[in-house]
Image (spheres, helix red, strand yellow):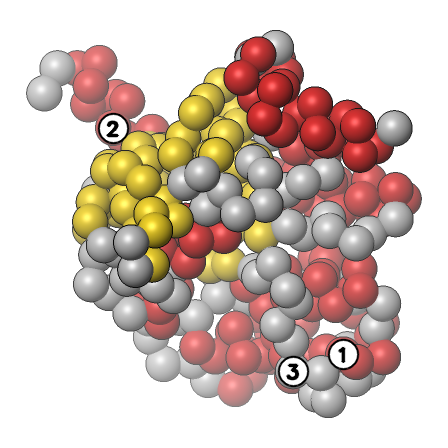
Amino acid sequence: MSWKEAKQSSMRILEGQGVTKYFGGLAAVSHVDFHVDKGEIMGMIGPNGAGKTTLFNLISAALPLSSGEIRFKGQKLNGLKPHQICKMGVSRTFQETKVFANMPVLQNVLVGAFFGSPNRVLGADATREATQALEFVGLSAMSTTPVKDLTLANQKRVEVARALATKPEVLLLDELMAGLTPAEVSEAMELVRKIRDKGITVFMVEHVMKAIMGICGRIMVLHHGEKIADGTPQEIAANKTVIEIYLGEEIRAGS
């Protein structure tokens, strides 16, 4: 390995080669190569059904790979269980918010604090981690509120806080901005920047173009399970293929 290759490799905290997932005869993700550099906010876009959430499910081991390889800090994730990958330092949120609706906010976040650490966690330590995570996302005042009584935007923040309570090095955000008002989108964008500034690498799937173009340093585009582009927001916005299959559709939808 050359010095340049070694330097490049040390920057890559998460990467995949030939990542493929078949459902029956259909390739939901097909031979996708990707990498996420330490400290960046990386975006992933594409039409519905492009394979974006499936790729997140493969990274987090919610689904097994059909073929290919995924590595975190150089270590293969193939064959590991979701809780093992979480304890290694890769956490996630979900496209459809998955919260314990009848439990108070703090109890939801405690789940992450207790089960995200590779070591045994004492109750007092878990409570401190959960409380700090809630303060970070701006929900300290709602710690005793049942999650079902929160707005969608705040339920999404609970999920982010729960993921942060696992103390991840990489956070996968699956459509954090979906269903939010323009003001809530702006607040969520600021939260994502704060997470990155905290030293956590962010890999996010998003349909809100204002967000993806505004905060990501690099964007990957999937279409029918295949990667068709990877570049800066400016490069992606000028890519004729991406405009034809996705951005043009988004522009029409927003007009």
Please give the residue where the numbered disc 1 appears in the rendered image.
147
Q: How far apart are marks 2 and 1 (CA)?
A: 41 Å
Please give the residue where the numbered disc 2 appears in the rendered image.
9
Camera-side residue: 123 or 52?
52
Instruction: Report helix, strand or loop for mark 1.
Output: helix
The C terminus - image quarter: top right
Residue 145 relative to residue 82: left or right = right
For residue 61, what is the image quadrant? bottom left
Q: What residue is shown at x 59% (from left), y 68% (from top)?
A: 162
Q: Distance between the residues labelled 2 and 3?
A: 39 Å
State the image coordinates of residue 108 (x, y, percent, origin top left).
63, 79
- Residue 16 appears in the figure: no
Query: Is residue 86 placed above or below 144 in the rendered structure?
Result: above
Query: Is residue 137 placed above or below 211 in the rendered structure?
Result: below
Alpha-carbon neighbours of circle 1 within 10 Å: few (<14), some, or many (≥20)?
many
State the image coordinates of residue 193 (x, y, percent, origin top left).
66, 38
Please give the residue where the numbered disc 3 appears in the rendered image.
100
- Residue 102 appears in the figure: yes
- Residues at discs 3 and 1 in contact (Cβ within 8 Å): yes
Q: What residue is shown at x 22% (from left), y 14% (from top)?
A: 4
Q: What residue is shown at x 70% (from left), y 88% (from top)?
A: 103
For residue 110, what is the image quadrant? bottom right
Q: Earlier in the sequence, mark 3 or mark 1?
A: 3
Camera-side residue: 41 or 231?
231
* Residue that protrudes farthest toward the front in the picture: 25
Residue type at mark 2 is Ser
State the image coordinates of residue 252 (x, y, percent, origin top left).
79, 28
